[in-house]
Structures are given as C-alpha cells and as structure tokens.
Amino acid sequence: MLLVVVVAAIVIRSTVADPDTASDGGPATDETDGWVSEVAPTGRLLAVGDGTVCSTSTTDVHCLDATTGEERLTIPIDKGLPTSPVLLDDRLLVGTSTGVGGGLFAYARDDGEELWDVALSVDAERELPVVDGVVTVTDGRQLVGVDVASGDRRWEDYTSDGREDPHVSGRDVFTDGTRVYTAIELLDPGAGDASGHIVAVDPGTGAEIWRSPVLGDVGFGSGVAAAAPFDDGSAVAFLMEGYPGRVLVLDAATGQLRWEVDLTSDHVSVVHLDGSTIVADGPTTRAYDGDGGQVWEVASPVIERNPDLIGPGELVVARGRLFVAGYDVVELDPATGGADPIRKGVSATDVAIVDDRLIIAEMRGIVARSLSKIGD
C-alpha cells in the first residue's frame, strides 16, 4: 500500500482571516495566533483527538498537528470516495463507497499502516458511529456491525432479499453513544408505495430495540438526514430527508414520538445543546425547548448577510459552543441566537475545537484560529 508520512511543516502561513476585513470573495489575512494549511482541501467532516485533526479530500486522508498545522500523516485512498474519518485511540477508520475495492478500512494512527479492510460499500455522509468497539455502517440496503479491533463482522441485519422485507433506507447510521439509529423501509409492490420506521439497534449484537411509529417520509431510499441526541440522553431529534421535511423528536427508550416540527426549506441543519433543539431552516434559525415550544427565532446569519444564498450552513456543536459552518463561519449564542462572525466567504464544511484552537475545514484547506481571538 502506498503511504506518505510527512514530518516537515506544510503550513502556508501563520495567519487567519479577520472577520471585519474579509471580503466575500475569500479570506483576508491578519497577523494573529493561528495557521492555514492548504495541503488538505476538504469537503468532509473533521476528526480530532490528542492534538491531531484529520479530514479527507476526494483522494486522501490528511492528519495535521492541531497546534502548528504541520502535516503528520497522509494516506492515499484509491478504492472509492472516502467518508469522513473516525479518529480513535490507536487507529483511524475510513469507509469508501461504490467502486472496485470499496470497503471499510482501519489504519494505524502513528504510521498509517493498513490494519484491516472489509469489503463493504460505505456511502456515508456523516461520521461513522463507533460504540463499545463496534462501528456500524450501511452496506447497500443492509446494516453491518464491524469489530474495530479485528475488522471481523460482528453481525448483519435487514439482509433479506425479499422486496417486502425491511431494508435500510438512506446512507447514514447515527448514535447517541448507547444505541445506533437508522431508517428502514417497507415496500408494498402491489400498491407501488413505501413507508418505514426509524429503528434503534444494539450496536454490540445488531438486535433491534424498537421501531418508531410508521413514517410516510421513509422509503424509496429516503431516510434520516441528521440526528441530534439530547444532552440528557432521553430523546433524539431526527431530521428527515425529503421536501417539505420535518424534525421528529423520539423518546430514546421507546421510540415514541414526543413532538415534531414542520420545515419550510430543503436546506436544514439540526443540533441539540443546553436543553434546546436548534434548527437552521433556510432563512430562519429557531430553538425549541424539551417539549417542542419555540424559545427564540432569528434570521439565519449566513443568509442574512448574503440574501442570494439558499443554504444556512451546518450547525455544529464543539465543546459546548454553537457554530455555523457555511459560506461564513459564525458562532451563535444558544440561549438567544445572537451571532458573532468569525470568518467570511470561506465555504466551510465543519469546525472543531482542539486544545486552544478553533479548527475550520474550508474549501481551500484547514485553518486554525486561537480561541482567545474569538472570545471566551
């Protein structure tokens, strides 16, 4: 396997954008505490841990030192489009989608050696969920649990070839740290119709714990676009695919519906923080309490500044702070929706916090900025 380990600095410059001077066409620079690395342009999510930040481009996995921006590791991926990476104590997981040799791969964190691979077609858009030493992925229309240590398949579920039997609908699997969740579809060939459920599955055994009530917006490949577990573990907010969409909040123990919110846009993001479910719904961002009551509503800050945009960006929770990663990067006050711009015109996909750095995945690469420069 081709492997490149880089020990020299690949930092382009130790500067970051000044939100007061950055233009819509791209970031300006201002001498401050941070770095910019253009070796890892990314459209995927960040994985962080132990002073390291990793992400994937269309062809490689890149891992950088979060303090200096120096590149620690590059792993070429030539077996399909890589998913967002998962960074564990001693290894890094990456899935690849359709194509010759697509699968799930584990690499050593220290030198990038391939530890194992499993022949699967992993077309995930979100982070692969790892719970109690098992990573759960979709493989076509079935659900598979893989042992992180060995790469052995622990279990498979929803595997029947029967058209009327339940199969996974959608690309992603989600977790609250205890259960894993996905959508399954039930087809009615005679009526040419489909419906389905959200299911909770034991990640250790693959056993189904519960099914939600029947959902008409599951089926024909549509399922769950995102999930936001409640802070106290009591419920999960699910963003359903399709338009017009909705957010469903299900009880984590039983799968029963607690409350739901209809959406007005097909560009939506949802997170949960400090007891509130926060939804960026096109031009409007709103917060709801535990019973579904609206707490506040504000204009989505990215669209407010750029009215021609249709996407509000992705809401991201990092170390108890709320950010928007989109055309602009903005920090939001989860109690009021108040906005504090951080970077403008950078087309970000994700943010994370490592030690005293805010790490931003942008169209041009990965940027780090000192947290002291953006407030407490």
Image: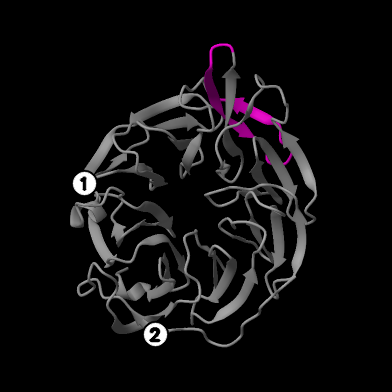
Q: Earlier in the sequence, mark 1 or mark 2?
A: 2
Q: Nearer the viewer, mark 1 or mark 2?
A: 2
Which quadrant does the N terminus fall into?
Answer: bottom right
Examine the image and state in which quarter residue 47 appears: bottom right
> What amino acid is found at the position of numbered circle 2 in the picture?
Ser
Examine the image and state in which quarter residue 143 appears: top right
Q: Residue at x 66, y 65 (%)?
A: 89
Q: CA distance from mark 1 to mark 2?
A: 35 Å
| Secondary-structure class at tag 2 | strand
Can you give x and y, in whole percent of width and height, for residue 17 in the image?
30, 75
In the rendered image, the vertical position of residue 187 relative to residue 81, given as above or below = above
Q: Is residue 162 left or right of residue 300?
A: right
Residue nearer the viewer, 87 or 143? 143
Is 340 inside the magenta-drawn segment?
no
* Residue at the disc numbered 2: 14
Is 195 inside the magenta-drawn segment?
yes
Furthest toward the front, the residue is: 100
Can you give x and y, in whole percent of width and height, for residue 28 in the image?
27, 77
Q: Is residue 120 left or right of residue 17?
A: right
Specify the segment rendered in magenta: 190-211
Furthest toward the top, the residue is: 190
Q: Is residue 50 visible?
A: no
Residue nearer the viewer, 313 or 101? 101
* Residue at the disc numbered 1: 298
> What amino acid is found at the position of numbered circle 1 in the picture?
Val
Furthest toward the bottom, the residue is: 8
Which quadrant does the C terminus fall into?
Answer: bottom left
